[in-house]
Image: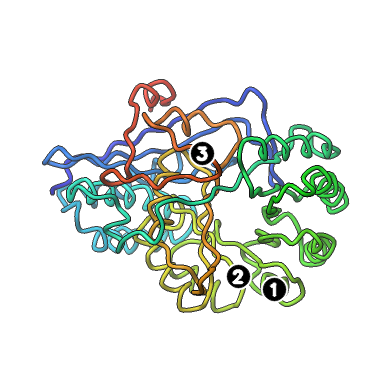
Amino acid sequence: MKIVDIKIHVLKSPLAEPFAFSQGWVRQRSATLVEVLTEEGITGWGEAFAQGLEPPEIAAAAVQYALKPLLLGANALDTEVLWHKMYHATRDFGRKGSVIAAISAVDIALWDIAGKTHNVPIHVLLGGAFRTRVQPYATGFYRVNGQGESARLADEAIRHHDAGFRAMKVKLGYGVDDDIHCMKAIGAAIDGRGITLMIDTNHAYGRAEALRLGRALERYNLRWYEEPVAPEDLRGYAEMRDKLTMPIAGGENEHTLFGYRDLFAANAVDIAQPDLCSCGGISAARHIVTLAQAHGVAVNPHVWGSAIAQAASLQLIAALPVAHHSLFAQEPLLEYDCSSHPFRQQLITQPIQQRDGWVSIPNGPGLGVELDRSIIERYRVAG
């Protein structure tokens, strides 16, 4: 299964209405898609995570100039061998960030090829499906003005409920007082509707503010408190776990088994959130899941990319063991980004959608989805 070419597709689409998370304003949606072609004609697709403030060209350059020369002529089915080859070749200038995102994209594409070669979904190659469907949670509640948007956010919560979501993640980090005010409005709007809430501050605060916010929101019985402090502040994470009652989540800005080794050793999180398009791909996610299992930490993937990111995450979620086995164990959820994103619904011929509060795991070969090349051509940036 010789690799004969690797194509990189950078997609961009300006937002009609920019929105903010705590670290800045998102003015466009972008994606770095990787297409791995083999001599036998089987093609695999992957994606490098481009968070809202990250130029997608960074990961694209890493694929083109650092990874592609290593992989041409290699056996596409050597997923573990090629992961280590890419990692060791870039170790002195990679290890985290966009270079690992580039490795992630290639690795996901290789797993897509493996599934198509064996005519099975990736979760079968990962050992089988613990579940065939997953409950999604709505990620949203971004700001369009900044502060003072509690009424609009409360209305958004009702819209998500009416659309079928029973779990929602609220973006906070716009000032502790404003955060508290917004949560009061959202809590009042959904009272009695059976909705589970999570919060995510995207590491907007230091330890004192993060603790103040967490203590003020303990009455909401949150599923988790995500990225309360900076990803480098592992002791701060551990302090949040010691002093707050809700589970602490993090890891979307952590990478590979090496980064997660340190995260778990610090007792930093109750819930690990690797992003498959950033952590090192499916191969790295396997390493991370094993580490998490050994430390009694739950895994719930972070998802903010295109339909490829969604599909890859669903394949992993299908094969995820629960962290704490019981008759009524807490199951992983699918992060379902509800912000404007043309590469999510339009990119594949059968969009991933929730129905009656559930999302089915794709059961086709590889990622289980088929791309619409006209959408790639429509949004691709010439380079």
Looking at the picture, tell me which residue is in the foreground, 128 or 326: 326
Reply above or below: 92 against 69.
below
Q: Which mark is residue 355?
A: 3
The amino acid on which the numbered mark 1 sits, given as a three-letter code, is: Arg
Residue position for label 1: 241
Residue 92 rendering spot, x and y as whole percentages:
40, 63
Crowd tier of the residue under label 1, counting other residues whose Cα lies within 10 Å: few below 14, some 14–19, many 20 or above: many
- State whether residue 16 is above or below residue 44: above
Mark 2, residue position? 270
**Snapshot quadrant of residue 157:** top right
Q: Position of residue 262 (x, y in %)?
A: 53, 74
Q: Earlier in the sequence, mark 2 or mark 3?
A: 2
Residue 280 image position (x, y, % from top left): 40, 57
Write the residue at 79% across / 45% down.
186
Under tag 1, what secondary structure? helix
Can you give x and y, in whole percent of width and height, for residue 381 in the image? 42, 26
- Where, by quadrant of the figure, is residue 336 drawn? top right
Q: Measure the alpha-carbon separation of dots 2 and 3.
A: 29 Å
